[in-house]
Image: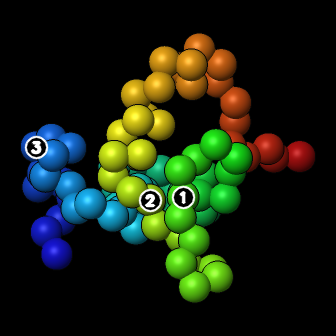
Amino acid sequence: MKQLSNFTDFSQFPPVLQAADVQSILGISTGATYALLKSEGFPTVSIGGKRKVVIKDEFIAWLTDERRKIKRVPILTIR
């Protein structure tokens, strides 16, 4: 598999993104990645119970959604 950092645009990403792909694209920690994958409104697909993947086109739509940019909601709450 090609390292995601070698891609120059979204069209080169694989059609299905794994957690490590999402983490690399967003530049976030492993914990933040899994919290995001479990969060409401994030376009994950569950495979076999625990495994979660993201369809590239849905990820791009989520990433570029103007409504998401207006209201920023933390994906992790630290108490």
- Is tag 1's residue or tag 2's residue first in the polypeptide sequence? 1
Most extreme residue toward the bottom is 48
Which of the labelled discs sits on residue 54, or is there none? Answer: 2
Tag 1–tag 2 contact (CB < 8 Å): yes
Can you name the residue that lies furthest to the right here? 79
Q: CA distance from mark 1 to mark 2?
A: 5 Å
Q: Position of residue 42 (x, y in %)?
A: 58, 47
Q: Which residue is mark 1?
A: 44
- At 59% from the left edge and 14% from the top edge, which residue is drawn? 70
Q: For residue 35, say whether it is visible.
A: no
Disc 2 packing (10 Å; few <14; some 14–19; many ≥20): many
**Picture residue at 79% right of the left edge, 44% below the top:** 77
Q: Is 75 on the left-hand or right-hand side of 14?
A: right
What's under tag 1, amino acid-wise? Thr
- Direction from residue 53 to residue 36 in the image, left or right: right
| Circle 1 SS class | strand
The front one of 77 and 70 is 70
